[in-house]
Amino acid sequence: MREYRKRDRGRSKRKEFSKQIIAREMALLWIVTLGVLGLAFYSVKENFDASFPWLTAMVSLPWAAWSVSKTGYTMKSMRENTKGGIVYDSALSKLGGERAFIDSMKNDVAG
């Protein structure tokens, strides 16, 4: 029985799908950014004498798309951080802290 508990404790919890998407998107963005920087360095090294707007677009457009998806993820997190139609943090601040919130919840359940 103890061996099972030890194995169970060692396992990490799976990340939510939305967190996996954000992490993978961020990794892909850095790969694209570093690849474009390498391509720009190679172009300058080989005396490529044209302008580079296509390189700046290859970097700036994916970062702009990432900011939109990150905003969507943040808004999703804000909506999930509610209890009974109110935002948990605002309820805590109005009641004066977590302890007061827990006590008020106990009173609601008991009364």
Image (tube, rainbow, N blue to C red):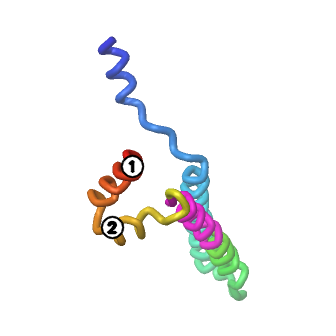
Could you say which is closer to the camera, residue 80 or residue 57?
80
Instruction: Name the residue located 33 percent from the left edge and 15 percent from the top edge.
Output: 3
User: In this rendering, does residue 39 appear at all?
Assistant: no
Give the crowd class for mark 2: few <14, some 14-19, many >=20 residues within 10 Å: some
Can you tell which quarter of the image residue 46 is in?
A: bottom right
Q: Is residue 106 above or below residue 28?
A: above
Label 2 SS: helix
> Is 48 included in the stretch rendered in magenta?
no
Instruction: Name the residue located 55 percent from the left edge and 66 percent from the top edge.
Output: 74
Q: Left or right of 89: which side holds 100?
A: left
**Magenta region, residue range:** 67-82
Could you say which is closer to the camera, residue 38 or residue 22?
22
Instruction: Name the residue located 60 percent from the left edge and 47 percent from the top edge.
Output: 17
Residue 35 percent location from the top left of the image: 60, 65
| Amino acid type, label 2 | Leu
For discs 2 and 1, the disc positioned in front in the rendered view: 1
Residue labelled with disc 1: 111
Could you say which is closer to the camera, residue 52 or residue 23?
23
Can you tell which quarter of the image residue 72 is in?
A: bottom right
Q: Left or right of 65: which side holds 83?
A: left
Q: Which mark is residue 95?
A: 2
Instruction: Name the residue located 55 percent from the left edge and 58 percent from the top edge.
Output: 80
